[in-house]
Amino acid sequence: MKKINTTLNDTLLTAIAPAIWGSTYLVTTQLLPAGHPLMLAMLRALPVGLLLLALLRKLPRGIWWLRVFVLGALNFTVFWSLLFVSAYRLPGGVAATVGAIQPLLVLLFSWLLFSQMPRRLALVAGAAGIAGVALLVLTPSARLDAIGIAAGLLGAVSMAIGTALSKRWQAPVAPLTFTAWQLTTGGLLLLPLALWLEPPLPALSVQNIVGFIYLGLIGAGLTYWLWFRGLQKIQPAAAASLGLLSPVTATLLGWLILDQQLSPLQILGAAIILISVWLGQRSAQATANANQPAPAGSRRPSQAGH
């Protein structure tokens, strides 16, 4: 019972991260200047990463320099860059639906990296999650764009690989330090791209500064600390399925703050997403239990149910 409660607490803490990420669209569109996606991504990552490094005073050593740059690129530089490209070229509903494939991609890369054959329940949960997101955010007028779809898919691949590798490469430091390393390297890699490809930022208003502080400290520092902490505690597939909570939060915030309407199909989609997340957690817990060493003198059950 104690172990179940611990796993539940770890899952709930990890779920806070994608729930907060759902506020990114609202904050970006309402508080931040438009037309500077790479600069916004860089300012979201680099300042808080440097602040955490200054407070923690711990740098990577040896092979971890390379690993941190790889993870920073996958989880932040590549993912955020392609995410903004997708968001600019596709309606939000299409972009979110493309990104919803990420739990299935994490299952694929967990299989390749950890030799964990995906369970049928996990595959059903992933497919249900995509259907739920489509019902929640797609509209009849949604248009398709080949570059936007490709960017969304590649961004999901980048984050999925980053999630799986973050689990495989267990950092020899606390999750907050691991977060600081990745935010800093991801921001440093974004900096030349932003300076090269985008015009300078206009003079910042008070609301712009408030938006940057929120996205940096809460939307990046706090959430990615919870995310990387969760990856040390729960299965990558379980964490990835929690990412489907982001469009639910974004839709609820649009309804509460922007006075957007909710249709019966959207409510059905949100319900399907929550069921998908629950099924994903059940499947991941079954996988974790199956991978535990069998007690001495006992035989492990067959894995034919995978």
Image: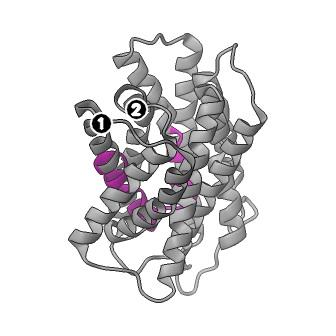
Q: Which residues are magenta?
A: 217-244
Considering the whole magenta stretch, tell me its main secondary structure: helix
- The total number of labels drawn is 2
Q: Amino acid at mark 1?
A: Leu
Looking at the image, residue 299 sits to the left or right of residue 194; the answer is: right
Identify the image quadrant of residue 30.
top left
Determine if residue 50 is in view: yes
Residue 33's tag is 2
Determine if residue 96 is in view: no
Is residue 229 magenta-colored? yes
| 91, above or below 87, in the image | above
| 303, above or below 107, in the image | below
Mark 1, other Cα within 10 Å: few <14 / some 14–19 / many ≥20: few
Q: Position of residue 70 (x, y in %)?
A: 56, 70
Residue linked to disc 1? 204
User: Mark 1 or mark 2: which comes first in sequence?
Assistant: 2
Looking at the image, residue 234 sits to the left or right of residue 175; the answer is: right
Looking at this view, is 154 or 122 the one in front? 154
Q: Position of residue 28 (x, y in %)?
A: 41, 33
Which secondary structure lies at badge 2?
loop
Q: CA distance from mark 1 to mark 2?
A: 8 Å
Quadrant of the image containing the C terminus: bottom right
| 74, above or below 251, in the image | below
Looking at this view, is 181 or 106 the one in front? 181
Residue 78's tag is none
Mark 2, other Cα within 10 Å: few <14 / some 14–19 / many ≥20: some
Looking at this view, is 274 or 205 the one in front? 205
Looking at this view, is 95 or 121 the one in front? 95
Looking at the image, residue 193 sits to the left or right of residue 138; the answer is: left
Quadrant of the image containing the N terminus: bottom left
Is residue 3 magenta-colored? no
